Amino acid sequence: MDISVEHKDKHQLILRVKGTSPTYMNTLRRVMMTEVPVLAIEDVEFRKNSGALYDEVVAHRLGMLSIKTDLKSYGLPSKCKCKGAGCAQCQVKMTLQATGPKTVHADDLKSKDPKAVPVHGKTPILKLLEGQEIELEATAVMGQGKEHAKWSPGLVHYKEYPHLTIKKQPENAKELAERYPEVLEIKGGKLNINEKGLVHHDVQEAIVAESRGAIAVKYEEDYLFYVETWEQLAPKEIINEAFTVLDEQLDEVKALIKEA
């Protein structure tokens, strides 16, 4: 299998993968989205809430916050030495205390672990008017996307690599270049293709249709693999942890086969 990096930043990693199959690509996609564990708020104990939002609404908003996760410090409760009872190795406590008038944001949460904090601190939780108060304790627990979407570390998908070919210069070449500047451009009076643009823009079918037969697309057996993080983990961490999880699952299968 041949892998090359097409694009990389703190939010997204795009890989070009050759020498594999859709089955393997989809397996990795599913493992990354549903098996890679991250922290998310699961339990909220309210002590005061005189704001306009019900406890359940505030708890739901807290639950959907992305929480920075250190995989070396935290693990799943089911695999923890506390056997799911709850300890500092599978969960972290956070407190929130505020008095109006103010808009309460995610960074008003005070975590017992300074590394396990909301990713987007300016996310609004609720608005308190004069004299209104909120006080609560929240517990962020390690979990997996297969249990609830709040434990999913990101969006992962793949597609076959599209190759565009200009069979003849289209009559509407200028119009196409203006409509799809990331992929098409006019050089020396002729329409040219920048296939690198197709890494970020899924417009090949539209270009083929609008070129009236002048441009064709061919899909070869190599793939573009996209990992877009919600920022609890870096894209590279998601990929590395996914391979670790997949290896563990394969070892379990081997063990079961030997016992059969």
Image (cartoon, rainbow, N blue to C red):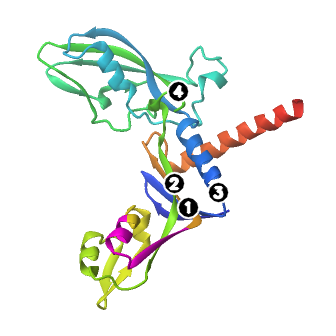
CB within 8 Å, label 3 to label 2: no
Residue at (77, 34) in percent of width and height: 252
Q: Which label lies toward us, 4 or 2?
A: 2
Q: Which residue is mark 3?
A: 21
Give the distance between the C-alpha atoms of the residues marked 1 and 3, in whole angstroms: 9 Å
Whether residue 96 is visible to the viewer of this picture, yes or no, is: no
| Residue, disc 2 | 158
Query: Which mark is first along the chain, 1 or 2?
Result: 2
The reply to whether dot 2 and dot 1 touch (C-beta < 8 Å) is yes
Seen from the viewer's position, the closer of residues 64 and 172 is 172
Nearest the viewer among 18 and 82 is 18
Give the x, y percent position of residue 130.
Answer: 11, 16
Q: Which residue is mark 4?
A: 147
Residue lying furthest bottom: 188
Q: Which residues are magenta?
A: 206-219
Q: Give amino acid for label 1.
A: Tyr
Secondary structure state at the residue bearing disc 2: strand
Residue type, label 2: Tyr
Tell me if label 3 and label 4 are in contact, CB under 8 Å. Answer: no
What residue lies at 61% left-to-right and 43% top-to-bottom?
A: 242
Reading the chain from its start, which is encountered first: label 3 or label 4?
Answer: 3
Residues at marks 3 and 2, CA–CA distance in whole angstroms:
11 Å
Q: CA distance from mark 2 to mark 1?
A: 7 Å
Type of amino acid under label 3: Ser
Residue placed most toward the observer, 207 or 82: 207
Instruction: Write down the residue under mark 1.
Output: 223
Which quadrant holds the N terminus?
Answer: bottom right
Residue 22, given in percent of the width and then of the height, sits at: 61, 54
Q: CA distance from mark 1 to mark 4?
A: 29 Å
